[in-house]
Amino acid sequence: MTIEHHPDESMLAAYAAGVIDLGQRIALATHLHVCARCRDFVRAMERAGGVFLEDAEPRPMSADALGRTLARLDEPPPPPSPAAAEAPDAPIELPAFVRRYAFGPWRFVAPRVRMRPIRLPEPGPTRVFLLKSAPNTALLEHAHTALEMTCVLSGAFRHDGGRYGPGDFDLGDDTVRHRPTVEDGEDCVSLVAMQGDLRWKGVWGRLAQPFIRL
Amino acid sequence: MSFDKAGGASRDVWSQRIERIARDQDRTAFAEIFNHFAPRVKAFMRRNGASESQAEDIAQEAMLAVWRKASLYNPSASGAATWIFTIARNQRIDAIRREQRGGGAVRVDDVEAEYEVDDAPLADLRMATAQSEARLREALTVLPGEQLKVIEMSFFQEKAHSEIAETLRIPLGTVKSRVRLAMKRLRAILESEHDDD
Ligand SMILES: [Zn+2]
Ligand SMILES: [Zn+2]
């Protein structure tokens, strides 16, 4: 797998700093899962975090903080995260922790296009879903009202920005207007983390708008 | 901003204390780590928008996690301060998620642990291995302090670029270009190291 398209460095820095919401975290983790190059960048940023921590001007803890913490050392540790079973039919390209979330059923979006929601355990501004499009499907030209992160799991699509195959990461924002076309051969399955809405362009897109809710 | 503090001999002292916790459940070593790092974690969280009591709680929980996870610590993979930073960061994310009522949330630590586990099969794909702590330290040392400052403020303190410009008394465009430069430069340094592999 050769990954051509990576998340922007500032997204990786935000990931390392822990300041992005769960939906976007999942999209970035899905890329990091297969991209050693970006993992290294995240680790470099975590090291920067260590330096910033070391350099922070200490803020005194409450008087009994150490005593109370020492008293808790012998407490049994909390049980590991509730080990939800992995969804048996979730794509194997997803990191295991994503496969443990609840997957909804595949739903019709448009001819040759299906989506499958991933239900997050907490409310947030980002929706996460799998998007599956049949070979040679040309998606309607559209723009985004906010950030849309896409990580390709299998298959490939192309748009103005180039070719996006397995592991590639695509970012749509309010400045991007594009028309992806799925390559010949196999279905293209992506994980998408989307904020805001899509805006479909052109007369067909506008006609389709009421029926297409991602 | 100094790298020697976190990167020189003093770092080895903290790593050794974590190892003493892992080996001997050494409470004295734990108290020393607590006294040094808890007030720093608290300060870090305060700057990140946590209230006084939230910051205090996260600092205590992070220290408890240091005790419990000490046996997982690998000093050749990360320095003590880096490791404690990631523990505190994950405590913070999980605390926020608990507040949002995320009963079934997969803990952040479980996510991070996957990368370690998954590095082995990825080697088959002939991808580069993870950077060692020493090489990351070298990479960061190349960045000027002024670039690190804007990285800290924009990502680790979540300040808007306009706020950073005001605080540092520099033009907005300078903030943006410093962030961009720092990011590109760091990526380039890490890349060139991969090429040597
Ligand atoms: Zn990447
Ligand atoms: Zn799009």
Image (spheres, coloured by chain):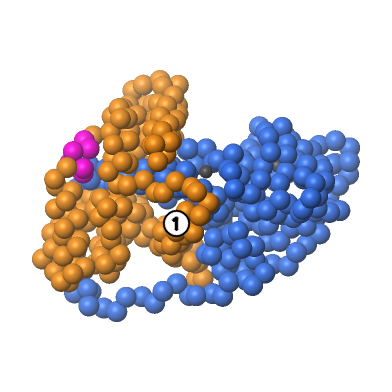
Chain colours: A blue, B orange
Q: Quadrant of the N terminus of chain B?
A: top left
Lateral position of residue A54 relative to residue B114, left or right:
left
Percent across and percent down for residue B41 are: 26, 52
Is residue A194 visible in this depiction of the protein? no
Measured as percent of width and height from the top left, residue A56 is found at 23, 44
Quadrant in which ligand 2 is drawn: top right
Asked if one can make out residue B168 in the rendered structure from this viewpoint, the answer is yes
Residue shown at 88% from the left, 44% from the top: A207
From which residue to which does the magenta span run? B2-7
Q: Is residue B81 magenta?
A: no
Q: Which residue is mark 1?
A: B119
Residue B114 x, y percent position in the rendering: 45, 61
- Residue A152 shown left or right of residue A159 in the figure: left
Q: Nearer the viewer, residue A125 or A30?
A: A30
B85 on left or right of A84: left
The dominant secondary structure in magenta is helix
Q: Is residue B117 left or right of residue A177?
A: left
Residue at left 71%, top 61%?
Answer: A116
Residue A115: image quadrant is bottom right
Residue drawn at point x = 53 percent, y = 51 percent: B125
The amino acid at mark 1 is: Asp
A87 versus A58 height, above or below: below
Q: Residue furthest left?
A: B28
Q: Secondary structure at mark 1?
A: helix
From what the image shows, is residue B134 above or below residue B75?
above
- Residue visible at 40% across and 29% down? B185
* Above or below, A188 relative to B172: below
**Can you give x and y, in whole percent of width and height, for residue B95 in the image?**
40, 62
- B90 or A35, which lies in front? A35
